[in-house]
Image (cartoon, helix red, strand yellow):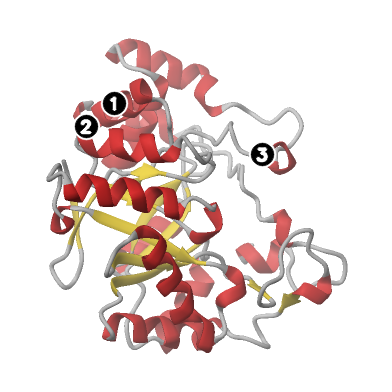
Amino acid sequence: MSMLQYQNGDTMPIFGLGTWKSAPGEVYEAVKTAIRLGYRHIDCALIYGNEAEIGRALAESLQSGVVTRENLWITSKLWNDAHAPADVQLGIERTLADLQLDYLDLYLMHWPVVIKKGEGFPLTKEKLISLEELPIATTWQAMESLVKKGLTRQIGVSNFSIQKLKSLLENADIPPAMNQVELHPYLQQTELLPFAQEHNIFLTAYSPLGSSDRPAALKAQDEPILLEDPTLLEIADKHHVTPAQVLIRWAIQRGTAVIPKSVNPARIEQNLAAVNVTLTAEDMAVIAALDRHRRYVDGSIWVVEDGPYTLANLWDE
Protein backbone atom coordinates (compact mmCIF):
# COMPACT_ATOMS: atom_id res chain seq x y z
CA MET A 1 0.00 0.00 0.00
CA SER A 2 1.40 3.38 -1.02
CA MET A 3 1.66 5.99 1.71
CA LEU A 4 1.55 9.78 1.82
CA GLN A 5 4.15 11.14 4.23
CA TYR A 6 3.41 14.31 6.19
CA GLN A 7 5.96 16.90 7.22
CA ASN A 8 6.31 15.41 10.72
CA GLY A 9 6.85 11.89 9.38
CA ASP A 10 3.28 10.61 9.83
CA THR A 11 2.28 8.25 7.03
CA MET A 12 -1.26 7.91 5.71
CA PRO A 13 -2.40 5.06 3.45
CA ILE A 14 -3.21 6.63 0.09
CA PHE A 15 -6.32 4.45 -0.18
CA GLY A 16 -9.14 4.35 2.34
CA LEU A 17 -12.80 3.65 3.00
CA GLY A 18 -15.30 6.48 2.67
CA THR A 19 -18.34 6.40 4.95
CA TRP A 20 -20.57 9.19 3.60
CA LYS A 21 -24.04 7.80 2.83
CA SER A 22 -23.27 4.49 4.59
CA ALA A 23 -26.53 3.69 6.36
CA PRO A 24 -26.87 2.73 10.02
CA GLY A 25 -26.75 -1.03 10.34
CA GLU A 26 -24.49 -1.25 7.28
CA VAL A 27 -21.46 0.88 8.12
CA TYR A 28 -20.52 -1.26 11.14
CA GLU A 29 -20.16 -4.37 8.96
CA ALA A 30 -18.49 -2.37 6.19
CA VAL A 31 -15.76 -1.06 8.50
CA LYS A 32 -15.22 -4.45 10.13
CA THR A 33 -14.95 -6.09 6.68
CA ALA A 34 -12.65 -3.39 5.34
CA ILE A 35 -10.22 -3.66 8.26
CA ARG A 36 -10.21 -7.45 8.04
CA LEU A 37 -9.35 -7.22 4.32
CA GLY A 38 -6.48 -4.81 4.94
CA TYR A 39 -7.91 -1.29 4.85
CA ARG A 40 -6.09 0.93 7.34
CA HIS A 41 -7.55 4.34 6.46
CA ILE A 42 -11.16 5.18 7.39
CA ASP A 43 -12.70 8.54 6.51
CA CYS A 44 -15.49 9.79 8.77
CA ALA A 45 -17.44 12.94 9.61
CA LEU A 46 -19.80 13.98 12.38
CA ILE A 47 -22.50 15.03 9.92
CA TYR A 48 -22.61 11.56 8.35
CA GLY A 49 -24.49 10.48 11.46
CA ASN A 50 -22.75 7.11 11.77
CA GLU A 51 -19.62 7.71 13.84
CA ALA A 52 -20.93 5.82 16.89
CA GLU A 53 -21.46 2.74 14.75
CA ILE A 54 -18.02 3.14 13.18
CA GLY A 55 -16.62 3.49 16.69
CA ARG A 56 -18.08 0.14 17.66
CA ALA A 57 -16.46 -1.48 14.63
CA LEU A 58 -13.12 0.17 15.40
CA ALA A 59 -13.23 -0.85 19.07
CA GLU A 60 -14.01 -4.47 18.25
CA SER A 61 -11.30 -4.60 15.58
CA LEU A 62 -8.76 -3.19 18.02
CA GLN A 63 -9.82 -5.43 20.89
CA SER A 64 -9.65 -8.56 18.75
CA GLY A 65 -6.11 -7.75 17.64
CA VAL A 66 -6.95 -7.57 13.93
CA VAL A 67 -5.20 -4.19 13.86
CA THR A 68 -3.43 -1.81 16.25
CA ARG A 69 -4.36 1.85 16.73
CA GLU A 70 -0.93 2.88 15.45
CA ASN A 71 -1.62 1.14 12.13
CA LEU A 72 -4.96 2.85 11.60
CA TRP A 73 -5.47 6.27 10.03
CA ILE A 74 -8.75 7.84 11.12
CA THR A 75 -9.99 11.12 9.64
CA SER A 76 -13.04 13.09 10.73
CA LYS A 77 -14.45 16.55 10.12
CA LEU A 78 -15.68 19.61 12.01
CA TRP A 79 -19.26 20.42 11.05
CA ASN A 80 -20.33 23.87 9.89
CA ASP A 81 -22.23 24.77 13.06
CA ALA A 82 -19.13 24.41 15.25
CA HIS A 83 -16.82 27.05 13.70
CA ALA A 84 -16.93 29.34 16.74
CA PRO A 85 -13.68 28.87 18.71
CA ALA A 86 -15.55 27.69 21.80
CA ASP A 87 -17.26 24.95 19.77
CA VAL A 88 -14.28 23.50 17.87
CA GLN A 89 -12.90 21.38 20.70
CA LEU A 90 -16.41 20.26 21.65
CA GLY A 91 -16.83 19.06 18.07
CA ILE A 92 -13.75 16.85 18.09
CA GLU A 93 -14.49 15.60 21.60
CA ARG A 94 -17.91 14.38 20.48
CA THR A 95 -16.35 12.64 17.48
CA LEU A 96 -13.67 11.02 19.64
CA ALA A 97 -16.31 9.78 22.08
CA ASP A 98 -18.40 8.32 19.25
CA LEU A 99 -15.39 6.71 17.56
CA GLN A 100 -14.10 5.44 20.93
CA LEU A 101 -10.67 6.93 20.27
CA ASP A 102 -8.21 9.07 22.23
CA TYR A 103 -7.04 11.01 19.18
CA LEU A 104 -7.62 11.42 15.45
CA ASP A 105 -4.94 11.22 12.81
CA LEU A 106 -6.53 14.00 10.75
CA TYR A 107 -9.30 16.52 11.50
CA LEU A 108 -10.71 18.64 8.68
CA MET A 109 -12.84 21.76 8.48
CA HIS A 110 -15.68 20.22 6.45
CA TRP A 111 -16.74 23.30 4.43
CA PRO A 112 -15.78 26.99 4.26
CA VAL A 113 -19.36 27.67 5.31
CA VAL A 114 -20.72 28.65 8.75
CA ILE A 115 -24.12 27.71 10.17
CA LYS A 116 -25.47 29.01 13.47
CA LYS A 117 -25.00 26.56 16.34
CA GLY A 118 -27.60 23.81 16.34
CA GLU A 119 -29.21 24.86 13.05
CA GLY A 120 -29.79 22.49 10.15
CA PHE A 121 -31.69 21.99 6.94
CA PRO A 122 -33.68 23.45 5.34
CA LEU A 123 -31.40 26.46 5.45
CA THR A 124 -32.47 30.09 5.46
CA LYS A 125 -30.36 33.23 5.46
CA GLU A 126 -31.08 33.58 9.20
CA LYS A 127 -29.36 30.25 9.87
CA LEU A 128 -26.16 31.18 8.04
CA ILE A 129 -23.18 33.25 9.18
CA SER A 130 -20.88 34.91 6.67
CA LEU A 131 -17.12 34.37 6.61
CA GLU A 132 -16.73 38.09 7.26
CA GLU A 133 -18.57 37.64 10.56
CA LEU A 134 -16.75 34.43 11.53
CA PRO A 135 -13.56 34.19 9.46
CA ILE A 136 -11.89 30.92 8.56
CA ALA A 137 -8.71 32.16 10.27
CA THR A 138 -10.56 32.40 13.59
CA THR A 139 -11.80 28.83 13.35
CA TRP A 140 -8.39 27.65 12.18
CA GLN A 141 -6.69 29.08 15.25
CA ALA A 142 -8.95 26.86 17.37
CA MET A 143 -8.16 23.90 15.09
CA GLU A 144 -4.44 24.49 15.73
CA SER A 145 -5.02 24.19 19.46
CA LEU A 146 -6.36 20.64 18.90
CA VAL A 147 -2.95 19.58 17.60
CA LYS A 148 -1.19 21.20 20.55
CA LYS A 149 -3.52 19.34 22.94
CA GLY A 150 -2.91 15.98 21.25
CA LEU A 151 -6.52 15.53 20.12
CA THR A 152 -5.46 15.16 16.48
CA ARG A 153 -2.10 14.66 14.82
CA GLN A 154 -2.90 16.61 11.65
CA ILE A 155 -5.40 19.28 10.64
CA GLY A 156 -6.69 20.23 7.25
CA VAL A 157 -9.65 21.46 5.27
CA SER A 158 -12.21 20.24 2.78
CA ASN A 159 -13.83 21.92 -0.23
CA PHE A 160 -11.27 24.76 -0.22
CA SER A 161 -10.32 26.73 -3.32
CA ILE A 162 -6.81 27.91 -4.13
CA GLN A 163 -7.81 31.42 -3.03
CA LYS A 164 -9.02 30.20 0.36
CA LEU A 165 -5.91 28.06 0.82
CA LYS A 166 -3.69 31.06 0.05
CA SER A 167 -5.48 33.16 2.64
CA LEU A 168 -5.26 30.39 5.23
CA LEU A 169 -1.54 29.83 4.58
CA GLU A 170 -0.90 33.53 5.20
CA ASN A 171 -2.56 33.36 8.63
CA ALA A 172 -1.79 29.86 9.89
CA ASP A 173 0.81 28.85 12.45
CA ILE A 174 0.16 25.23 11.48
CA PRO A 175 -0.48 25.05 7.74
CA PRO A 176 -3.25 22.76 6.48
CA ALA A 177 -1.88 19.30 5.74
CA MET A 178 -4.82 18.14 3.62
CA ASN A 179 -7.58 19.45 1.39
CA GLN A 180 -10.32 16.90 0.76
CA VAL A 181 -12.17 17.77 -2.45
CA GLU A 182 -14.35 16.24 -5.11
CA LEU A 183 -11.89 14.73 -7.55
CA HIS A 184 -12.41 12.41 -10.52
CA PRO A 185 -11.79 12.47 -14.31
CA TYR A 186 -14.72 14.84 -14.90
CA LEU A 187 -13.33 17.23 -12.22
CA GLN A 188 -9.56 16.80 -12.29
CA GLN A 189 -8.60 19.87 -10.23
CA THR A 190 -5.73 20.58 -12.61
CA GLU A 191 -4.89 23.94 -11.01
CA LEU A 192 -5.54 22.97 -7.39
CA LEU A 193 -3.36 19.83 -7.47
CA PRO A 194 -0.06 21.52 -8.43
CA PHE A 195 -0.77 24.41 -6.06
CA ALA A 196 -1.33 21.97 -3.21
CA GLN A 197 1.80 20.00 -4.06
CA GLU A 198 3.86 23.19 -4.12
CA HIS A 199 2.67 24.03 -0.60
CA ASN A 200 2.98 20.53 0.90
CA ILE A 201 -0.79 20.07 1.07
CA PHE A 202 -2.12 16.65 0.12
CA LEU A 203 -5.41 16.17 -1.69
CA THR A 204 -7.94 13.46 -0.89
CA ALA A 205 -10.45 12.61 -3.61
CA TYR A 206 -14.03 12.29 -2.43
CA SER A 207 -16.82 11.05 -4.72
CA PRO A 208 -14.06 9.43 -6.82
CA LEU A 209 -16.57 7.16 -8.58
CA GLY A 210 -19.05 9.93 -9.38
CA SER A 211 -21.27 9.59 -6.29
CA SER A 212 -24.22 8.11 -8.18
CA ASP A 213 -25.77 6.99 -4.88
CA ARG A 214 -25.99 10.44 -3.30
CA PRO A 215 -29.43 11.80 -2.34
CA ALA A 216 -31.75 12.71 -5.21
CA ALA A 217 -31.96 16.29 -3.92
CA LEU A 218 -28.25 16.67 -4.69
CA LYS A 219 -28.54 15.37 -8.25
CA ALA A 220 -29.07 17.26 -11.49
CA GLN A 221 -31.30 16.02 -14.27
CA ASP A 222 -29.53 14.03 -16.98
CA GLU A 223 -26.16 14.26 -15.26
CA PRO A 224 -23.35 12.18 -16.80
CA ILE A 225 -22.65 8.85 -15.13
CA LEU A 226 -18.91 8.58 -14.63
CA LEU A 227 -18.85 4.79 -14.25
CA GLU A 228 -20.50 4.45 -17.66
CA ASP A 229 -18.04 6.66 -19.53
CA PRO A 230 -17.06 4.83 -22.76
CA THR A 231 -13.38 5.76 -22.43
CA LEU A 232 -13.18 4.40 -18.89
CA LEU A 233 -15.05 1.24 -19.93
CA GLU A 234 -12.54 0.70 -22.74
CA ILE A 235 -9.54 1.13 -20.42
CA ALA A 236 -11.12 -1.18 -17.85
CA ASP A 237 -11.74 -3.82 -20.51
CA LYS A 238 -8.15 -3.56 -21.71
CA HIS A 239 -6.79 -4.22 -18.21
CA HIS A 240 -9.49 -6.77 -17.27
CA VAL A 241 -10.58 -4.65 -14.32
CA THR A 242 -13.71 -2.70 -13.39
CA PRO A 243 -14.31 0.98 -14.23
CA ALA A 244 -14.27 1.68 -10.47
CA GLN A 245 -10.80 0.15 -10.22
CA VAL A 246 -9.62 2.35 -13.08
CA LEU A 247 -10.93 5.45 -11.28
CA ILE A 248 -9.31 4.48 -7.98
CA ARG A 249 -5.98 3.71 -9.62
CA TRP A 250 -6.11 6.95 -11.63
CA ALA A 251 -6.38 8.94 -8.39
CA ILE A 252 -3.53 7.02 -6.77
CA GLN A 253 -1.21 7.47 -9.76
CA ARG A 254 -1.75 11.23 -9.56
CA GLY A 255 -0.51 11.15 -5.95
CA THR A 256 -3.88 11.88 -4.37
CA ALA A 257 -5.51 9.90 -1.58
CA VAL A 258 -8.80 8.30 -2.54
CA ILE A 259 -11.70 7.13 -0.37
CA PRO A 260 -14.39 5.22 -2.31
CA LYS A 261 -17.43 4.32 -0.23
CA SER A 262 -19.06 0.92 -0.25
CA VAL A 263 -20.96 -1.29 2.17
CA ASN A 264 -20.92 -4.25 -0.22
CA PRO A 265 -18.24 -6.77 0.91
CA ALA A 266 -17.39 -7.85 -2.65
CA ARG A 267 -16.98 -4.24 -3.79
CA ILE A 268 -14.97 -3.35 -0.69
CA GLU A 269 -12.54 -6.11 -1.65
CA GLN A 270 -12.64 -5.18 -5.33
CA ASN A 271 -11.86 -1.54 -4.57
CA LEU A 272 -8.87 -2.54 -2.46
CA ALA A 273 -7.52 -4.62 -5.35
CA ALA A 274 -7.28 -1.42 -7.41
CA VAL A 275 -4.07 -0.52 -5.55
CA ASN A 276 -2.37 -3.27 -7.56
CA VAL A 277 -3.64 -2.09 -10.97
CA THR A 278 -1.24 -0.08 -13.15
CA LEU A 279 -2.43 2.38 -15.78
CA THR A 280 -0.12 3.23 -18.65
CA ALA A 281 1.03 6.72 -19.55
CA GLU A 282 -1.29 6.48 -22.54
CA ASP A 283 -4.22 5.58 -20.27
CA MET A 284 -3.48 8.57 -18.06
CA ALA A 285 -3.27 10.89 -21.08
CA VAL A 286 -6.57 9.64 -22.47
CA ILE A 287 -8.27 10.10 -19.08
CA ALA A 288 -6.80 13.61 -18.80
CA ALA A 289 -8.85 14.56 -21.87
CA LEU A 290 -12.10 13.70 -20.05
CA ASP A 291 -12.02 16.74 -17.75
CA ARG A 292 -15.23 18.78 -18.04
CA HIS A 293 -15.10 20.67 -14.71
CA ARG A 294 -18.24 18.79 -13.67
CA ARG A 295 -19.09 18.94 -9.99
CA TYR A 296 -21.51 16.33 -8.68
CA VAL A 297 -21.45 17.97 -5.23
CA ASP A 298 -21.72 21.54 -6.45
CA GLY A 299 -22.32 23.32 -3.14
CA SER A 300 -25.73 24.66 -4.14
CA ILE A 301 -27.15 23.42 -0.82
CA TRP A 302 -25.45 26.43 0.80
CA VAL A 303 -27.00 28.96 -1.54
CA VAL A 304 -30.24 30.48 -0.23
CA GLU A 305 -32.06 33.67 -1.18
CA ASP A 306 -30.23 36.74 0.18
CA GLY A 307 -27.79 34.44 2.00
CA PRO A 308 -24.05 35.07 2.34
CA TYR A 309 -22.96 32.18 0.11
CA THR A 310 -23.02 31.92 -3.67
CA LEU A 311 -21.45 29.34 -5.94
CA ALA A 312 -19.07 32.08 -7.08
CA ASN A 313 -17.80 32.93 -3.59
CA LEU A 314 -17.84 29.31 -2.45
CA TRP A 315 -15.53 28.03 -5.21
CA ASP A 316 -13.94 31.40 -6.10
CA GLU A 317 -14.63 30.79 -9.76
> In the image, is residue 116 above or below residue 11?
below
Residue to which mark 2 is pinned: 37
| Foreground of the two, 37 or 187 | 37
Rendered location of residue 195, percent (x, y) = 38, 64
Q: Which residue is mark 1?
A: 269
Q: Position of residue 127 (x, y in %)?
A: 77, 73
Image location of residue 282, percent across then percent down: 30, 26
Q: CA distance from mark 3 to mark 2?
A: 28 Å
Query: In the shown orientation, is residue 209 left or right of residue 12?
Result: right
Badge 1 density bin: few <14, some 14–19, many ≥20, Cα 10 Å? some
Badge 2: residue crowd in 10 Å (few <14, some 14–19, many ≥20):
some
Residue 279 in view in this figure: no
Quadrant where the N terminus sits is top left
Dot 3 surroundings within 10 Å: few (below 14), some, or many (20 or more)?
Answer: few
Amino acid bearing label 3:
Pro
What residue is shown with label 3? 215
Q: Which residue is most to the right?
A: 305
- Taking the spot 47% from the left edge, 33% from the top edge, the residue there is 209
Which of pointers 3 and 2 lies earlier in the amino acid sequence?
Answer: 2
Amino acid bearing label 2? Leu
Task: Tell me whether the residue at label 2 lies in contact with that at label 1, contact meaning CB atoms closer than 8 angstroms.
Answer: yes
